[in-house]
């Protein structure tokens, strides 16, 4: 009798399980304790627009060697790259536009940002904490069986009394392997806001992720983001990408 009741309870629990729950459960053990070395590459392309007319455009690419082990976290930039960034930051002629793509890329490739790329499970769990499952179905990824879940990601509320949020939508499609871990994801963002009832801002973007599990970590091996932003006197289109290649 006790066995029958226990079996029924297990069946009930499994019936209510879903892909989002499985994903959270699979991510929890991945805390990044293993050593990982590799090459981190980041690229950016940004175009400032005036209607349909291109005002300016800049792009840049950087690469660094990264080590994360018991000795600490190290980002090793090439001396030649740092010199190019320093030359880029020098004053320009009056009226000329200063291009600082390299400097901005190096600044954005900070230790916390790179570390998150190498150990993404904790951050992804934060995003999923208040998320809502929209749908789930069987699918394939690179020719192999997978589960595809669609999730509404609910961002934490920000205490900005001067900012009125009109829209703040973040919808993720996540492909899961047989072990419940993410193989790939696509996230679409749409944000519309106004400030002091006068200034408005709109941003729409799409991020595409490819993941791999290495050294007890969920690693972003590729991330590509494309989007546009309009408001506060600026109208721009951009594309950012990050690639991390682990060393064997």
Image: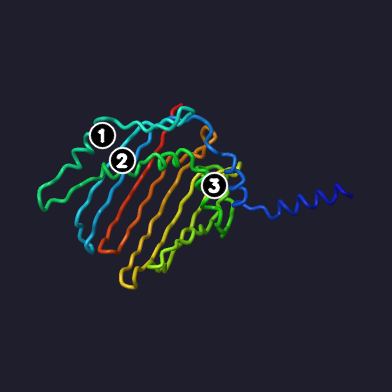
Q: CA distance from mark 2 to mark 1?
A: 10 Å
User: Which mark, by number, is residue 220?
Assistant: none
Q: CA distance from mark 3 to mark 2?
A: 37 Å
Callout 3 crowding tier (Cα within 10 Å): few <14, some 14–19, many ≥20: few
Which of these two is toward me, 218 or 130?
130
Tag 3 residue: 140
Tag 1 residue: 81
Q: Which of labels 3 and 2 is toward the front?
A: 2
Residue 247, given in percent of the width and then of the height, sits at: 43, 28
Residue 99 located left or right of residue 203: left
Q: Residue at x 85, y 47 (%)?
A: 3
Q: Residue at x 47, y 29 (%)?
A: 69
Q: Quadrant of residue 75?
A: top left
Which of these two is toward me, 173 or 242?
242
Q: Secondary structure at mark 1?
A: helix
Callout 1 crowding tier (Cα within 10 Å): few <14, some 14–19, many ≥20: some
Q: Give the number of marks.
A: 3
Q: CA distance from mark 1 to mark 3?
A: 41 Å
Q: Are marks 1 and 3 in contact (CB under 8 Å)?
A: no
Colour scheme shown: rainbow
Residue 163, given in percent of the width and then of the height, sits at: 38, 67
Q: Are marks 3 and 2 in contact (CB under 8 Å)?
A: no
Q: Are marks 2 and 1 in contact (CB under 8 Å)?
A: yes
Residue 152, given in percent of the width and then of the height, sits at: 52, 59
Tag 2 residue: 106
Q: Earlier in the sequence, mark 1 or mark 3?
A: 1
Residue 6 located left or right of residue 216: right
């Amino acid at each position: 009798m006790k066995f029958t009741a226990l079996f029924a309870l297990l069946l009930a629990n499994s019936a209510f399980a879903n892909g989002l729950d499985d994903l959270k459960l699979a991510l929890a053990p991945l805390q990044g304790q293993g050593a990982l070395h590799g090459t981190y590459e980041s690229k950016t392309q940004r175009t400032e627009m005036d209607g349909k007319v291109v005002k300016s455009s800049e792009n840049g690419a950087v690469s660094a060697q990264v080590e994360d082990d018991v000795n600490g976290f190290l980002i090793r930039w090439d001396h030649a790259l740092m010199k190019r960034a320093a030359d880029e930051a020098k004053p320009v002629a009056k009226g000329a536009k200063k291009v600082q793509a390299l400097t901005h890329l190096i600044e954005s490739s900070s230790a916390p940002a790179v570390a998150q790329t190498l150990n993404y499970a904790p951050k992804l769990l934060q995003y999923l904490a208040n998320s809502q499952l929209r749908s789930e179905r069987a699918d394939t990824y690179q020719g192999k069986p997978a589960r595809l879940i669609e999730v509404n990601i609910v961002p934490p509320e920000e205490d900005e009394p001067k900012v009125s949020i009109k829209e703040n939508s973040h919808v993720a499609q996540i492909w899961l392997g047989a072990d419940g871990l993410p193989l790939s994801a696509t996230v679409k963002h749409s944000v519309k806001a106004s400030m002091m009832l006068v200034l408005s801002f709109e941003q729409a973007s799409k991020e595409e992720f490819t993941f791999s599990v290495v050294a007890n970590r969920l690693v972003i091996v590729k991330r590509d983001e494309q989007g546009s932003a309009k408001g506060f006197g600026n109208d721009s289109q951009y594309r950012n990408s990050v690639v991390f290649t682990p060393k064997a």
